[in-house]
Image (cartoon, helix red, strand yellow):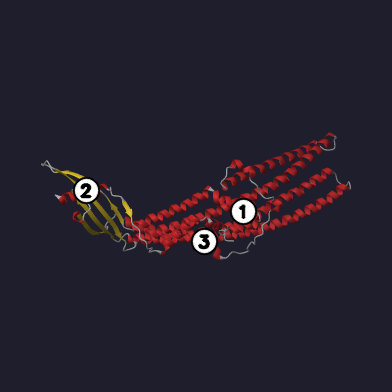
Amino acid sequence: MKKTIIILLLASLILTDITPAMAIGSKKTSEPKKASITKTHKQRLKSDEFKYEYINYDWWNNFKDPTLTGYVDKAIKNNYGLKMATIAVDEYYQAVKLQFANELPQAGVGFSPAYVKQPGTTSSNWSFATPAIVNYEADIFLKNRDKTKSVAKEYEQSLQDERAAYIAIASAVGTTYLNIVKLDKMITLQEEIVQDRKIIYDLMLLRNKEGLTSTADTVKANKSYIAGLTNLTEYKKQRKILLNQLSVLIGESPEKSEALTRISYDELNYNGIIPTEISSEIIAQRPDYIKAEQMIEKAGIDVRVAKKEFLPSINLTGLALFLAGDIGSAWTTKNALTALAAGANWSLFTGGRKIANLKLKKDEYERVLNNYHQTNLTAIQEINDALITIKHDNKKYQDTKTQSELERQDYGFNQASYNEGIISKLDLIQMKENVLSTDKLVADQKINCLVDYIGLYKAVGSQL
């Protein structure tokens, strides 16, 4: 009877799965890589310094603009996209811990009271059972260890995704900010152009009334004035859009975008050294390059795991059961039952699933290997493109500055002619627009060069 009750209680406990599971860890660390990941993640929780290392914060000081570096700092702290990227890293870290738990024994305890009445009898009895069960899959082929390594590689990849996100947001903040500064200058120059065109139109209107200018020329002057207003409106629209974008990048509401301060265009100057060539070692530090390498490592581990799926799994089970008719003596040694069992499970036929899985993992390895080669070529291309763009845009900028200086000299000669009464005020104002137009080109190309520098900074993974 006692054996029957024991068997029934054990079957009830196992089938209904009411015993809580507890993971039992070890104080010793058997895998150095695991310890390294844990240490790094704990350091992340204590300090945000790694975020500033991601973006090479000191590089931004080359612009000599505290307002710009302040916005970059705000983006690091407040940008919601970056916060999500950091949370994603923690999700992958928890996935590593979850998989690592599969390498450890699983233990559970339970308590089950039973009230038993045998058929054909009038008597009934209480019994109290306390089972303790320990299960462990003996990882003699290191299959679970390899699975943990595979998940750890995903965690490492998430770190590179996070780093790439921080570099991208910092670059977006810098590019948006500089374009706002450019539009401030463009708007100032365009307002002066519009003002001069209004003067020209008013003069043409007076001359037309006196019969000195044709109506067609007056209409053309009016069209030019209206076109200037249209361009001014477009510049203001673009600036407002960029201000809204900058607000979102730094984690603030676009409603406050008009209050965002910035440096004057004329005070903006980049003092950093622009390299003419980039070392291959820097290319290898790009987030996508490192991630591509880690993907190959993970794919290799997954192939190894797929091969080990053909091997048997070995499980060890330990049981301790305390059974008594009264609760007071439930945990005495005389009422204890212990057992230790081992079993091997080897799937002989799975419908080709394991073979297909192995081939799948091999295909994935080939795919990520090709992705690695493509990433390498793309990295070289992007850096070369950035260097070429900087070189030619800077040449254009220098030529346009020379053109602007010549326009100013020419305008100076025209002012002298006007003072001597050789040309009219109308002619002088029309010639002044050439100076303002070249000034707009200079402003546009100067900012383009600075944006090119940010493009190179992004292409090399902030390692300038």
Marks 2 and 1 in Cβ contact (< 8 Å): no
**Residue type (three-letter) at the residue carrying disc 3:** Asn
| Mark 3–mark 1 distance (CA, rounded to whole Å) | 31 Å
Does residue 259 appear left or right of residue 367 in this picture? right
Q: Secondary structure at mark 3?
A: helix
| Residue 59 locus on image (x, y percent) | 61, 58
Q: Please name the residue that numbered disc 2 is placed on.
A: 327
From this viewpoint, which residue is outermost toward the right?
A: 420
Residue 427 seen in render: yes
**Could you classify mark 2 by the number of other residues whose Cα lies within 10 Å: few (under 14), some (14-19), or many (20 or more)?**
few
In x, y percent, where is residue 155? 44, 56
Residue 205: assigned label:
none
Left or right of 449: which side holds 347?
A: left
Q: Which mark is residue 69?
A: 1
Q: Earlier in the sequence, mark 3 or mark 2?
A: 2
SS for dot 2: helix
**Count of numbered tags:** 3
* Towards the viewer: 12 or 377: 12
Q: Residue at x 28, y 49 (%)?
A: 19
**Marks 3 and 2 in Cβ contact (< 8 Å):** no
Nearer the viewer's eye, disc 3 or disc 2?
2
Amino acid type, label 1? Thr
**Residue labelled with disc 3:** 376
Rendering coords of residue 206 (x, y %): 83, 36
- Crowd rating for badge 1 (residues with CA inside 10 Å; few <14, some 14–19, many 20+): many
